[in-house]
Image: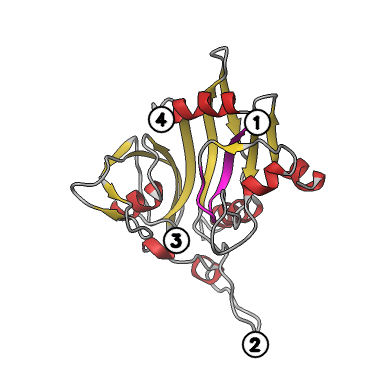
Amino acid sequence: MKSSFFEEYLLWEDENWVAINKPPGISTLADRASDLNMLELIRKRYPDAQACHRLDKETSGVLIFARNPEAYRHLSLQFQNRQVEKLYHAVVHGVHRYENFTIDAALDTRDAPPVKVVSRGKKSVTVVSTINVYRQHTLVACRPFTGRMHQIRVHLAYAGTPIAGDTLYGGSPVYLSALKPGFRLKKGTLEQPLMGRAALHALTLDFKDFEGKQIRMEAPYPKDFRALVRQLELTKGS
């Protein structure tokens, strides 16, 4: 990994783990669409690194890698036993005032994507709370208590609140012209969405080290997510 890249996205590291603020557009592991992935980049610095969990390619935020096999097993067991606490922020369509709203909907990931809600699927639970309400959107905090593929995206869509920009699950892009009355686009130009992906960010991740100490990683919003939220704030009273 180039030192400049590492320095830009590094959140924290010790002799056992490395926490990265994963940028959108890069897969956690190798996929058919691209040769570039986060594990490959991390292994240029730490050849024995292993990914302890995954984020969707377009999702930004906290991603943890183990630097040795013992650290990998230690954290993998916490994920397996649902002892790792994760918090995501998402911008969803519509105005919603949630307070620990629980979405308990089983998911079928066998032929995914797309992931489907099915009665006999794998148990999946997400708790949602409102952070801020805007004119046409809501910023929400999501705590997934299980770790299924696309869980938050599917659960929010199932609840009738798809994530902005998540076209796979019923969301649509956010355009400034829809937020700002009187907005005029320059003649001959095509308006671009404020954010070119699903508005989902893995904000924090909590786990315990070998001594039982609670470690919390927090990833600041990336530029695109920050810009979207700022624009929603600016047009809140328009």
Residue that label 4 marks: 80
Residue 171 visible at all: no
From the top left corner, tell me how far across and down residue 166 is, in percent.
44, 61
Amino acid under disc 1 = Arg
Q: CA distance from mark 2 to mark 4?
A: 53 Å
Q: Secondary structure at mark 4?
A: helix
Q: CA distance from mark 2 to mark 3?
A: 27 Å
* Residue for point 65% across, 31% down: 67
Mark 1: give few (<14), some (14-19) or many (20+) Cα within 10 Å: many
Confirm or deny contact between disc 1 and disc 3 (CB under 8 A). no
Amino acid under disc 2 = Gly
**Front of the two marks 2 and 3:** 3
Q: CA distance from mark 3 to mark 4?
A: 28 Å
Q: Is residue 153 shown above or below 238?
A: above
Confirm or deny contact between disc 1 and disc 4 (CB under 8 A). no
Give whichever of 4, 49 is nearer the camera: 49
* Residue for point 57% across, 12% down: 211
Q: Which residues are magenta?
A: 54-66
Q: Earlier in the sequence, mark 2 or mark 4?
A: 4
Q: CA distance from mark 1 to mark 2?
A: 51 Å
Q: Is residue 68 shown above or below 135?
A: above
Q: CA distance from mark 1 to mark 3?
A: 33 Å
Residue that label 3 marks: 166
Residue that label 1 marks: 67
Q: Earlier in the sequence, mark 1 or mark 4?
A: 1
Confirm or deny contact between disc 1 and disc 2 (CB under 8 A). no
